[in-house]
Amino acid sequence: MSSVISSNNPDAVEQAVNVLNSGGLVGLPTETVYGLAARADLDGAVSKIFEAKGRPTGHPLILHISDISDLHRYAVTIPTAAIHLAEHCWPGPLTLLLHKSSDVSRLVTGGRETVAIRIPANDCARQIIRQCGHAVAAPSANVFGHVSPTTAKHVHDDLGENVDLIVDDGNCSIGVESTIIDFTTARPQLLRPGGFPVEDLESIIGTQILMPTGESRASGMLSSHYAPKCKVVLVDSVAEAASVLAEYRDSRVLDHWDNPPLYAASLYTQMRLADDEGLSAIIAVLPPKSGLGMAIRDRLTKASFL
Ligand code: TXA
Ligand code: MG
């Protein structure tokens, strides 16, 4: 069984750093979802991430750094707009896709010449990364294809002894993964909607961000990702939810459509709870498409594919 340490424990950072430096895996709290972290420069440790999650090695990992100055250590030929976003949005739920430096292992990037980088807005996570002295690679700490974890218990439920230490910092405040913007193409392009609304990013850089087209290169964009076992039924209004509810035995309505931050923060917990309770379906009222609603609709839609 993996051990769990509270982020309030004065030894939490040191213990996590020791695990990372000896090539182990840490369940790392972030503001979006919990990550499964390994030191990105230790190929043996990074390999354990793919094994623990059952994730194909072609699916690249996000590098998590603690300070913006480290951006230039891991990425090269960074466009001004990307630096601008990093300065405004980090720490925060934004991931930038850039050209990788020679310091980044191809194991982390799934063989690509590009690297995804972010600074998480979680004090404990940043302290761990800073003291580790190297970026950590961290996908969401769930079994591949399952719902992402927003509590330490979710991490434990999915990965058990495959993670050496879980740092428990309570519930993730945002609850959906980071927004990923590709800056390796001629114009910035959205790869995954997430915790940072695209409209806000566009107003910071003063240019339009292209919507994902065709086959996206981000693995989270595969259909049937983020999925609970129960059926996820999408509806457009509370009234429609009420009429559909009767069709399903043991089902529940998710109706925070008018409060996107609360919807996002509770979404994955509700999906996991539905499975724990053996519900047959979740009836989800879709929030408006703007702001955080875009990411919530994206995850609900992925979860609704059978
Ligand atoms: O909020 C988050 O981003 C969380 C926390 C832990 O930071 N992490 C997360 O990681 O969601 P993961 O591995 O579950 O999703 C990362 C996504 C994947 O869809 C992956 O394909 C994409 O980022 N990605 C990473 N590096 C990439 C690259 N070089 N090119 C294209 N996509 C990349
Ligand atoms: Mg994931």
Image (cartoon, rainbow, N blue to C red):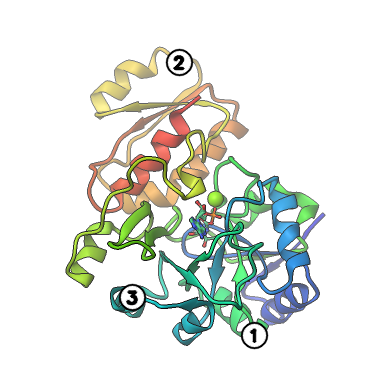
**Residue 299, quarter of picture:** top left
Q: Which residue sits at x=53%, y=21%?
A: 280
Q: Callout 2: few (<14), some (14-19), or many (20+) C-alpha neighbours within 10 Å?
A: some
Question: 100 and 173: which one is in front?
Answer: 100
| Mark 1: secondary structure | loop
Residue 26, above or below 81: above
Mark 1 and mark 2 lie on one chain; the one further toward the N terminus is 1
- Looking at the rendered image, the quarter that the N terminus falls into is bottom right
- Amino acid identity at mark 2: Tyr
Asked if marks 1 and 2 touch (Cβ < 8 Å), the reply is no
Q: Position of residue 218 (x, y in %)?
A: 47, 50
Asked if disc 1 is less than 8 Å from ligand 1, the answer is: no
| Mark 2: secondary structure | loop
- Amino acid identity at mark 3: Pro
Q: Which residue sits at x=26%, y=65%?
A: 201
Q: Which residue is labeled 3 in the image?
A: 79
Q: Which residue is labeled 2 in the image?
A: 248
Mark 2 and mark 3 lie on one chain; the one further toward the N terminus is 3
Question: 63 and 18: which one is in front?
Answer: 63
Q: Which residue is labeled 1 in the image?
A: 133
Q: Callout 1: few (<14), some (14-19), or many (20+) C-alpha neighbours within 10 Å?
A: some
Q: Position of residue 43 (x, y in %)?
A: 74, 67
Q: Which residue sits at x=69%, y=76%?
A: 12
Q: Position of residue 288 (x, y in %)?
A: 23, 42
Say which of marks 1 and 3 sits in front.
Answer: 3
Q: Position of residue 271 (x, y in %)?
A: 51, 37
Mark 1 and mark 3 lie on one chain; the one further toward the N terminus is 3
**Mark 2 and mark 3: span between their CA atoms?**
51 Å
Asked if disc 3 is less than 8 Å from ligand 1, the answer is: no
Question: 272 and 70: which one is in front?
Answer: 70
Asked if marks 1 and 3 touch (Cβ < 8 Å), the reply is no
Residue 48, above or below 8: above
